[in-house]
Amino acid sequence: MQYEEILHRCFRCGYCKLPGNYIDFNCPAYLAFCFETYSPGGRMWLLRAWLDKKIETTDRFQEILFSCVNCGNCVEQCTFPKFKDQLLLAFMAGKEELVNAGKVPPAVRDCLTNYQHHGNPYGFARKKRHGWAEDLEVDRFSEHEYLFFPGDVGSYDSRGQEICRSVARLLKANGISFGIFGADEVSDGNEVNAMGETELFRYLAEENIKTFNASQVKKIITLSPHAYNAIKNDYLQFGGQYQVFHYAQILAPIIKQQTYKSDVPPMRVTYHDSCYLGRHNGEYWSARTILSSLPGIQFVEMDRNMQNALCCGGGGGNFFTDILGRGANNPARARIREAAETAAEVLAVACPLCAVVLEDAVKAERLDERIEVKEISEIANEILDKAN
């Protein structure tokens, strides 16, 4: 297994489970299950024992490996700089070993099967991939400056489609030249890669790269931070070299320069950092710039923010496999409780996966009357409609 040489180096200090201010547990899997084996340090020791054939490939072992949501908190907090950057790579390599052996949880198997046969985790037809844009005047990509890539959740999930339309509307309103490929694209594959199915990820990436290159795509705007991460960082190994932007990076400088004709009612807002924007790619400020530039916004931070943010638990394929479950210790529910403590009316997000997961958590916590989850383009459209 790749990276197995680092597994014995963990001395179980436990910082990988915590944020930088040590106020609570910050590893989503450990938070959900409260067993040391679900922590990054415990997972490393389990992997070492498994490779040494001291433990069997049980259902529980599979669940523990695939409970890792690739949030990157362990990488951020690890006190051993010589191998910390390889932690997630080692966990992904362990998943790859299980995938290659055909020993994965049923939910993971079914999810990967959908990716393989349909090019998306939902198992829906590719021809429906551009359904979100049917009522919008969105062109097919040709001579446009940017390709807009909506990703799987933006293409197929009903809430994701709403967010996709909101972002497209905001891009059009600000004069951004973009087009789409619709049914000619497949999943970006970020979750496939995180689940260890490297050959399937290669296939999906190469399919998209072929489509992009045939139309001479140079610049890409993604809806999802997950797609942003895959296309920006992981497509390079297959020859896919593009300028890749999350839509907040495109809109932040434009909205910051705008002036407004009228005041709007105040709105108290806190912001949830997406792991694939934040810890994975160091992008913490574009969404905050948009929010702070809009009139009426009273912005307040949660205790865990930026590099110390608590993941919603939707990464690493868990959005589709739900291995973490939905109990009271689910990280999304913990995050909603933290957001509610700020007295914010709105929890802003810049990721469609985060939006769906956290909205479900609001309902589970019965906090519907105290806080609402909104995607930042929805907030911007709502305020700009009133202020201009």
Image (cartoon, grey):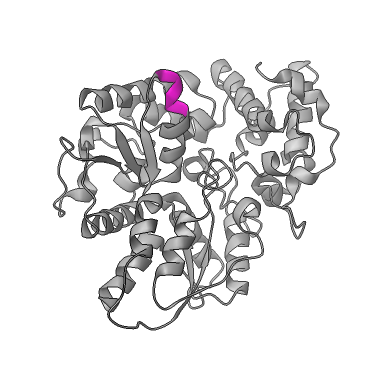
Q: Position of residue 375 (x, y in %)?
A: 40, 60
Q: Is residue 189 left or right of residue 272?
A: left
Q: Position of residue 204 (x, y in %)?
A: 37, 25
Q: Residue at x 57, y 77 (%)?
A: 343
Q: Residue at x 30, y 55 (%)?
A: 167
Q: Position of residue 327 (x, y in %)?
A: 62, 56
- Quadrant in which the N terminus appears: top right
Q: Quadrant of residue 238?
A: top left
Q: Is residue 235 magenta?
A: yes
Q: How many marks?
A: 0
Q: Residue at x 20, y 49 (%)?
A: 133
Looking at the picture, tell me which residue is in the foreground, 175 or 330. Answer: 175
Looking at the picture, tell me which residue is in the foreground, 108 or 176. Answer: 176
Q: Is residue 257 left or right of residue 337?
A: left
Q: Is residue 167 magenta?
A: no
Is 273 above or below relative to 315? below
Q: Main secondary structure of the magenta part?
A: helix
Specify whether residue 162 is in view.
Answer: yes
Is 356 above or below relative to 224? below
Specify whether residue 110 is in view.
Answer: no
Instruction: Give the residues drawn in magenta, as a range.
Output: 234-238
Q: Is residue 75 left or right of residue 92?
A: right
Q: Position of residue 216 (x, y in %)?
A: 23, 27
Is 59 above or below relative to 386? above
Going by the picture, which residue comes out furthest to the front?
257
- Quadrant in which the C terminus appears: bottom left
Q: Is residue 32 left or right of residue 178?
A: right
Q: Quadrant of residue 72?
A: top right
Q: Quadrant of residue 264?
A: bottom left
Q: Residue at x 33, y 73 (%)?
A: 383
